[in-house]
Amino acid sequence: MRAVRVFAAVSALLLGACASTGGLPAQPFTDVPVSEGWQPYSRDWVVIETPGVTAAKLVYFAKTDVDATLAEVRRLMPQSGWREKATERFVNPEGFKGQWAEYAKGEDVCRVTVIEGASATHVDLVLARRQARR
């Protein structure tokens, strides 16, 4: 009986830790700038690292509109050596306006997608980078 209680307690702690949205670094990559006003949204974060490639999808909420949020991106990215390559405005299937901008730094690519939402602006950073060969 004691073993069952210990197992249940440990399971609850582990599951609670997995469900937590806290503990995310606001800026997991030092050369990919993130505005101080953006809040990390963990449910959709993914970071995959292999010996040759890092791929990441980072999701944030911003309190500013699409144009102001993208203006902040355009201010921050060049400060870290990123160059804007392409951009396009769109309306998603739910009718929300958005815009994406693609940045390059060497062989690395970062695509920033900003979409207005009902209560916050949704910011996706998708990063693809080749790891230095060892």
Image (cartoon, rainbow, N blue to C red):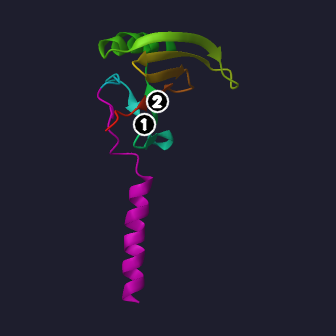
**Would residue 25 be counted in the magenta stretch?**
yes
Q: Nearer the viewer, residue 67 or 124?
A: 124
Helix, strand or loop at mark 1:
strand
Residue identified by numbered label 2: 128
Q: What residue is rendered at 39% in x and 81% in y?
A: 5
Q: x%, y% of residue 21?
A: 40, 46
Q: Earlier in the sequence, mark 2 or mark 1?
A: 1
Q: Which image quadrant: the N terminus?
A: bottom left
Q: Answer yes or no: do the residues labelled 2 and 1 have beta carbons within 8 Å?
A: yes
- Farthest residue toward the right? 93
Q: Residues within 10 Å of mark 2 (few under 14, many from 20)?
A: some
Helix, strand or loop at mark 2:
strand
Q: x%, y% of residue 51?
A: 39, 43
Q: What residue is rendered at 39% in x and 13% in y?
A: 72
Q: What residue is rendered at 44% in x and 54% in y?
A: 19
Q: Residues within 10 Å of mark 1 (few under 14, many from 20)?
A: some
What segment carries the magenta color?
1-30
Q: Which image quadrant: the C terminus?
A: top left
- Farthest residue toward the bottom? 1
Cα separation, mark 2 vs mark 1, equals: 6 Å
Q: Nearer the viewer, residue 134 or 130?
A: 134
Residue 132 image label: none
Q: x%, y% of residue 86?
A: 53, 10
- Farthest residue toward the front? 134
Give the prevailing secondary structure in the magenta stretch: helix
**Would residue 28 be counted in the magenta stretch?**
yes
Residue identified by numbered label 1: 54
Q: Is residue 22 above or below residue 97?
A: below
**Residue type highlighted by circle 2:** Ala
